[in-house]
Image (cartoon, rainbow, N blue to C red):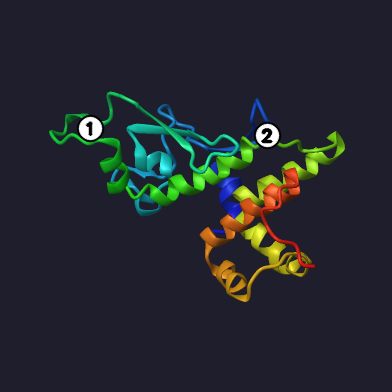
Amino acid sequence: MPSSDFLDQYTIIKPAELNGFPGLFLKMNEDERHICPFVTPEGCRIYHDRPGACRIYPAGRASSKLKGQEEAREFYFLVKEAHCRGFQEPKEWNIREWSGDQGLERYNAFNDLWTEVIQHKGSLGPEEAIPQKLHMFFMACYNLDQFRNFVFKSTFLQRFDLSDERIEQIKSDDEALLLLAFEWLKLVLFGEKAIALKQ
């Protein structure tokens, strides 16, 4: 499914209260229980591709990265809800074991990169430039198909110094493309030289 179709069908966009960056929320079913649209009587129909918040449940994770810190600080908490059958299981897990079992390492790494952007201490610049910058943020973070088109169908590759190997990688690898998106956002939003310009 193209990114734009997924966004239209399954998400709600809300501006964040503190920084104004648009946040994306999953649109729950309009039934009495407001359950996830991907949950069926047989279980989750996107289980192998489920997002990090589903993988870590019933735990939760928050992270923050202060300027000058190499790694993000992690905070974990437990969400104890009656419908979660995991609490009835005899096995006990610590957070490291659970994260490893659920394949969370790469999800956490990309969430931390996203957090670096939304918690960046730099200014977005003049007020008249902010709407365009928020549009760039939305495209780069949430609509990877549109961002890929932007990279390959605009003057992007004439302006930025990317190796041939990296260019080939971002053609088909969404993780490589998202990494480039975060680097580009730090430059266009805050002027941080996270990606090299061609001479």
In this view, 157 is above or below 40:
below
Q: Position of residue 187 (x, y in %)?
A: 72, 50
Where residue 85 is drawn, which disc sits there?
1
Q: Nearer the viewer, residue 57 or 11?
A: 57
Q: Position of residue 172 (x, y in %)?
A: 54, 68
Q: Amino acid at mark 1?
A: Arg
Q: Residue at x 63, y 72 (%)?
A: 163
Q: Nearer the viewer, residue 74 or 10?
A: 74
Q: Which residue is mark 2?
A: 121
Please say whether residue 45 is visible from this viewpoint: no
Q: Residue at x 55, y 70 (%)?
A: 169
Q: Position of residue 181 (x, y in %)?
A: 63, 54
Q: Is residue 56 left or right of residue 111?
A: left
Q: Residues within 10 Å of mark 1 (few under 14, many from 20)?
A: few
Of the residues under marks 1 and 2, which one precedes in the sequence? Answer: 1
Q: Position of residue 191 (x, y in %)?
A: 75, 47
Q: Is residue 18 left or right of residue 169?
A: right
Which quadrant would the C terminus be assigned to in this image? bottom right
CA distance separating discs 1 and 2: 41 Å
Q: Quadrant of residue 78?
A: top left
* Secondary element type, mark 1: helix
